Image (tube, rainbow, N blue to C red):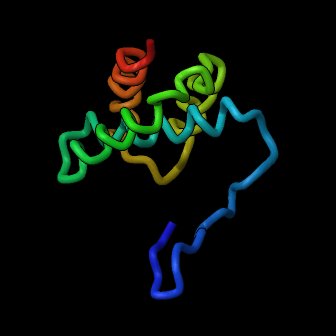
Amino acid sequence: MMLTPDGPKVIDWSNAEDGPPGLDWGMSAVILAQVAVGGEVYAELARETLVAMLDGNADRVTEKGLAEARVRRAAKPTMSAHEVQLLGNSAELIRALLP
């Protein structure tokens, strides 16, 4: 998403496909958790966003969706070795935040 003077715009959906909602929720959770555990400038904001996303929606994040999201993120050619290493910690964070 990009905020523009005309409002939010969706960009870069070159890998969009039909799939189960649990994968969408899992992918969003994994991406936010990667940033949250990475210790970079947006880590705290990503954690807060992840907590807010899961609040009242934890049942939408499935174990199958999380597992598939991690596999897809790890296989993404633009991911650095450091980002791939964060996947384990990101999964731990997500599970810790789920009821």
The outermost residue toward the right is 18
Find residue 4 and report its horizontal and vertical position in percent. Answer: 47, 82
**Is 79 in front, or is 41?**
41
Residue 37 location, quadrant: top left
Q: Is residue 5 left or right of residue 90?
A: right
Write the residue at 26% across / 47% down. 45
Q: Using the image, determine if residue 42 lies above or below residue 2.
A: above
Q: Is residue 7 left or right of residue 19?
A: left
The outermost residue toward the bottom is 5
Find residue 15 and report its horizontal and vertical position in percent. Answer: 69, 56
Find residue 83 and report its horizontal and vertical position in percent. Answer: 36, 41
Find residue 66 and report its horizontal and vertical position in percent. Answer: 57, 25
**Is 7 in front, or is 19?**
7
Write the residue at 35% across / 15% down. 96
The outermost residue toward the front is 56
Q: Is residue 7 left or right of residue 62?
A: left
